Amino acid sequence: MAPPDRSASPAVDAVTRALLRAHRERRRCSSLDPAFALRDDVEAMAVQDAVCAALAGTDEVRTVAWKAGASGPGAPVSACPLPVAGLHHGATRLPGTAFHQRGVEAEIAFRLARPPECPASDDEVLPCFDALCVAIEVVDSRWIEAMAATERLRLADLQSHAALVLGDWLPLRPIDWATQACRVLVNGEPAARGVGTHSCVDPGRVLGGWLRHAAARGAALQAGDVVTTGSWGRALWVGPDDHVLVDFPGLGKLRLAFEPG
């Protein structure tokens, strides 16, 4: 998977090297180095692309999974490519010590059936998708300062992404998202629950913004590509040997267990 042909500034190079070292050595680095002064979000996204390319296997030629989200209906959509190595399917066990922190987010992911032929409005994009599933995103940070690092450096750090677990795919169908319940259990105990708690209420409202973002970025989207659409509530921080159950009644359940060692 070759990185995009972009002219990298010294800051892009410095941040990319630091984050790749953090990934490979499983240790954090400080975000306070003056050499990490990215000029804008375009440079932060150049770091994302370079990190994903460097972490890819030799047979990976493009991004197949993304995260996207918005702070509310009508708000700008942010998006980020995800490394394939962090993509998991079905009930999953992960080594708890592979993460500095373990934030878990209950989400809904969508599967692309076909890329749009031209940029489509938010009301026209759903036919481009054929399935959805319950998902769990694990969030973490490669920065010592974690969520206190600057917004731009957190953006460069794959928006604090660590892993994405996907449940069973369901054919896309109309859903009353405002009445959709979601609950999260940690070690069998209720940790969060709510109804219609996605920031946009309807997570499908993120899809048009993601498609436009990917197109502007020159991404070669294909059928089968996946995008997860943001948390239904706050991230829950769990321990290195905790287990999590995410339940969207009517849509499915998904289990993730962290194991010590």
Image (cartoon, grey):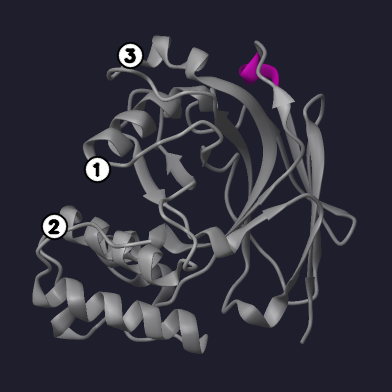
Report the amino acid beneath label 1: Arg
In the rendered image, residue 214, in percent from the top left (x then y), is placed at 32, 38
Q: Quadrant of the C terminus?
A: bottom right
**Who's the residue at 23% across and 57% down the image?**
4
Residue 217 location, quadrant: top left
Q: Is residue 52 above or below residue 142?
A: above
Report the amino acid beneath label 2: Asp
Disc 3 residue crowd, few under 14, some 14–19, many 20+, Cα 10 Å: few
Q: Earlier in the sequence, mark 1 or mark 3?
A: 3
Disc 1 residue crowd, few under 14, some 14–19, many 20+, Cα 10 Å: some
Image-based side of 132 in relation to 76, left or right: right
**Residue lying farthest to the front in this orientation:** 59
Q: Nearer the viewer, mark 1 or mark 3?
A: 1
Span shown in magenta: 176-180
The residue indicated by pointer 1 is 217
**Who's the residue at 40% across and 58% down the image?**
159
Q: Earlier in the sequence, mark 3 or mark 2?
A: 2
Q: Are marks 1 and 3 in contact (CB under 8 Å)?
A: no
Q: Quadrant of the N terminus?
A: bottom left
Task: Please tell me whether residue 178 belongs to the stretch shown in magenta.
Answer: yes
The residue indicated by pointer 2 is 40
Q: For numbered disc 3, what is the local secondary structure?
A: loop
Q: Earlier in the sequence, mark 2 or mark 1?
A: 2
Q: For numbered disc 2, what is the local secondary structure?
A: loop
The CA span between labels 1 and 3 is: 18 Å
In the rendered image, residue 125, in percent from the top left (x then y), is placed at 43, 16
The residue indicated by pointer 3 is 121
Q: Viewer-proximal residue, 221 or 212? A: 221
Image-based side of 154 in relation to 98, left or right: left
